[in-house]
Image: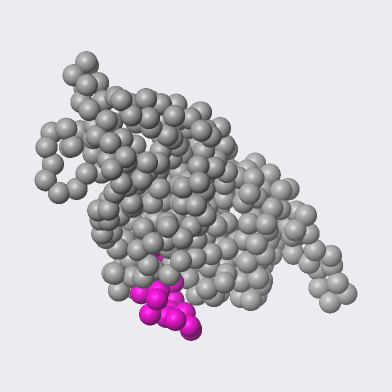
Amino acid sequence: MVAMGHVDAVERQFWAWETSTDWWVRIVLQVWDESQWLRNFHMRKGTFLELCELLSPALKRKDTRMRAALTVQKQVTIALWKLAAPDSYRSVAKHFGVGKSTVGVAVMQVANAIVELLLSKVVTLGNVQVIIDGFAAMGFPNCGGAIDGTHIPILGPDHQASQYINRKGYFSMVLQALVDHRGRFTNINVGWPGKLHNARIFRNSGLFRWLQEGIYFPDHKITVGDVEMPIVILGDPAYPLMPWLMKPYTGALDTEKELFNYCLSKCRMVVECAFGHLKGRWRSLLTRSDLSETNIPIVIAACCVLHNLCGSKGETFMVGWEVEANSLAADYAQPDTRAIRRAQRDTLCIREALKARFLSEQGNL
């Protein structure tokens, strides 16, 4: 049933009466089928076991004379349950027969292990030619990714709280991400206060410096019209127009500019979809986190790794998750972005050449 994209929902409350650790050992590990694993942990059991194996070097603990250590599997399960839904620490603790503080410790230990052991291996650029071919098939040539930022709601921090109030009036932290044609995160930057504009965050990121210096992508240029075009990324109007960053036209638009914007927006949608799936699968990112400013970026980064891991394993994304996510997200609308209109003449030439190319290709259809 999972392969067909249909999963029978199993409500968490079904097991709410069972509060001892036996529930985990006797029911979850031994009885639950794939649909129940997917519903409650947002990944199948096989992917879960592989994740535990990868994290084992950082999570394996020894028993003491006072108490038995939590197994790696139980630590990861507690963390996934907490990340997958905005349940309280008390509720999670009751399900797994542990204390509230144990839940908080497990979440951070697992998140730290994911970032330490997997981030550099899973959130990577990968095969650039495959990405270029993927975007070309979607309608945009020589494209290496789409970039955007998204706000993660948080509680007001103790220090410099005003810097975290975004233009919608709530406290947030910004995740900047570059994604490939499949919606896989290839570069992330997280931890910036919600007050900052996406363009400012981008200009202060390592990704901007690497792109500016021409060292992030290979030197792969194509000729469009009579101009040379390097590998580009796609952004919304908030981002600066650069030789390696294309964004939509703003202001009065003629037919040619509207066509260009359509082609760009169609490909740039992959980053918005990626954010939607990230928050839909790990819905704790949709409600105000009570973690410290130091720990929140670690948890967000860990969720990005899990997003890529689930994608690489072909994990089902259930429609119901998106419905629940949209309901939660309604309380924290994403701030609007303001356009930055400065642009270099050479960059304008590239965009104009692309505009003419798209018009010519449409005429040949």
Query: Which scheme is used to colour this image of the protein?
Result: one colour
The furthest residue to the right: 65
Q: Residue at x 28, y 59 (%)?
A: 337
Who is closer to the viewer here, 234 or 190? 234
Who is closer to the viewer here, 307 or 88? 307
| Residue 4 is a magenta residue | no
Q: Is residue 7 visible?
A: no
Q: Position of residue 67 (x, y in %)?
A: 81, 73
Q: Is residue 292 visible?
A: yes
The furthest residue to the top: 364
The residues colored magenta run 151-165
Who is closer to the viewer here, 4 or 242? 242
Question: Which quadrant of the view contains residue 61?
Answer: bottom right
Task: Classify 192 as above or below 270.
Answer: below
Who is closer to the viewer here, 296 or 281? 296
| Residue 154 is a magenta residue | yes
Q: Position of residue 238 (x, y in %)?
A: 30, 54
Task: Classify 271 as above or below 11.
Answer: above
Q: Is residue 53 left or right of residue 42?
A: right
